[in-house]
C-alpha cells in the first residue's frame, strides 16, 4: 500500500506558494506533499476515526461493491458514497466502475505522512 504525503497550510500560504512556484522562485521537490489541506480540522474531517475504520475495512476485506461495503460497515449506502467520493478526491481511495451499476472501492493509501509547520 502506498504512503500518502499530506501537507497542511493556510489558504493564504498555499496561494502565495503557488504564485512563487509559477514565478520560478520556488522549485517543487519530489518528496513534497501532493495533497494539501487548509487546516488540521479539515484533514481530521476526511481522516476521522470512522473514515479510517472504513479504509481499514476496504483494505482488509476488499469488497467488490459499495453494497458489500455498506453491509460490512453498517453504514448507509448514501452516506458511504459521499464519504468515499471525498476520500477519492484526495487520492485515499479509488472508486473503480465495473459497469453502470457496480462500483468497487479500493484503498489507495493506508499510511499517511503529514507535514505541518506552525510558521
Image (cartoon, helix red, strand yellow):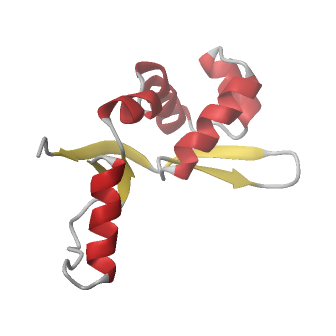
Q: Residue furthest right?
A: 100
From the viewer's perspective, tell me whether residue 85 is left or right of residue 40. Answer: right
Q: Please provide percent x and percent y for residue 58.
A: 54, 35
Q: Residue at x 18, y 44 (%)?
A: 116
Residue 3 visible (yes or no): no
Q: Which residue is painted at 23% across and 73% down in the image?
A: 30
Q: Position of residue 50 (x, y in %)?
A: 48, 20
Q: Position of residue 7 (x, y in %)?
A: 28, 50
Residue 41 lies, with reference to residue 97, above or below; the image says above
> Is residue 101 visible to us here?
yes
Q: Is residue 58 left or right of residue 28?
A: right
Residue 61, picture quadrant: top right
Q: Please tell me which residue lies in front, 62 or 11.
A: 11
Q: Residue at x 40, y 47 (%)?
A: 109
Q: In terms of depth relative to the viewer, which is nearer, 11 or 35?
A: 11
Q: Height in image: 81 above or below 101?
A: above
Q: Residue at x 71, y 29 (%)?
A: 68
Amino acid at each position: 500500500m502506498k504512503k500518502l504525503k499530506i501537507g497542511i497550510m493556510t489558504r493564504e500560504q498555499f496561494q502565495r506558494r503557488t504564485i512563487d512556484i509559477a514565478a520560478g522562485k520556488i522549485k517543487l521537490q519530489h518528496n513534497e506533499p501532493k495533497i494539501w489541506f487548509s487546516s488540521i480540522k479539515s484533514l481530521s474531517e476526511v481522516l476521522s476515526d470512522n473514515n479510517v475504520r472504513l479504509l481499514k475495512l476496504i483494505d482488509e476485506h476488499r469488497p467488490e461493491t459499495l453494497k458489500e461495503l455498506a453491509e460490512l460497515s453498517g453504514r448507509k449506502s448514501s452516506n458511504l458514497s459521499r464519504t468515499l467520493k471525498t476520500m477519492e478526491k484526495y487520492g485515499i481511495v479509488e472508486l473503480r466502475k465495473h459497469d453502470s451499476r457496480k462500483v468497487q472501492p479500493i484503498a489507495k493509501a493506508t499510511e499517511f505522512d503529514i507535514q505541518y509547520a506552525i510558521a
